Image (cartoon, rainbow, N blue to C red):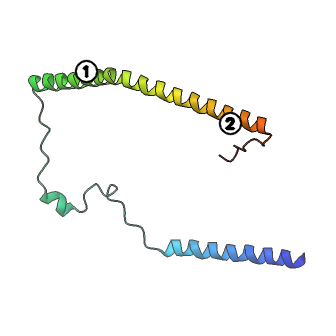
Amino acid sequence: QADEEAAKQAAAKRRQAEEEKRSAARLEAPPRRPHRQERGGAIDDDNKAASPPPKPPRLRTKEEHQKAARDRLAALQLGFELALAAEPMLSAQEDAFRAAVLAERRRAEAERAARARLGLPPIDTSLL
């Protein structure tokens, strides 16, 4: 038990020494270079001066606004029409799926009943 205590103390001293070494290395390390956004966005001022000033965004005319609104409305209407057209197909698929699930349940129940009639143990479905 004394050996264990000594080993624990040695490990604690080792960890403390490593931590002190790390903090000393951190203090001696050169300061990190500020991120591009911290420096103001441009990599350096030469690049910023070389690029032309950005153009102000062009304002849309009333006609362009109306056309964009009509296009959005048409897209919405088309989406609704497609959804309504797909609804019968989806309900048919749901009905087919429900029928398949019921058929599988009936088949499994019939198999369990047949195994019970024959005196066979039930199939362990916990691993399936």
Distance between the Cα atoms at labels 2 and 1? 51 Å
- Give 6 or 73, whichever is nearer the viewer: 73
Which amino acid type corresponds to the residue marked 1 in the rendered image?
Gln
- Residue drawn at 37 percent across, 21 percent down: 88
Label 2 or label 1, whichever comes before in sequence order: 1
- Give 65 or 127, whichever is nearer the viewer: 127
Q: Is mark 1 on a helix, strand or loop?
A: helix
Q: Decide if residue 19 is on the left or right side of residue 51.
A: right
Q: Decide if residue 58 is on the left or right side of residue 41.
A: left
Residue 10 vertical placement versus 83 (above, below): below
Q: What element carries label 2?
A: helix
Q: In which quarter of the image is residue 4?
A: bottom right
Give the image location of residue 127, x and y in percent: 68, 48
Q: Quadrant of residue 62?
A: top left
Q: Are marks 2 and 1 in contact (CB under 8 Å)?
A: no
Give the image location of residue 47, x and y in percent: 18, 61
Q: Decide if residue 31 is on the left or right side of residue 112.
A: left
Residue 50 vertical placement versus 26 (above, below): above
- Residue drawn at 56 percent across, 31 percent down: 101
Q: Decide if residue 107 is on the left or right side of residue 3.
A: left
Q: Disc 2 designates what residue?
A: 111
Q: Disc 1 designates what residue?
A: 77
- Residue drawn at 36 percent across, 60 percent down: 35
Q: Quadrant of the N terminus?
A: bottom right
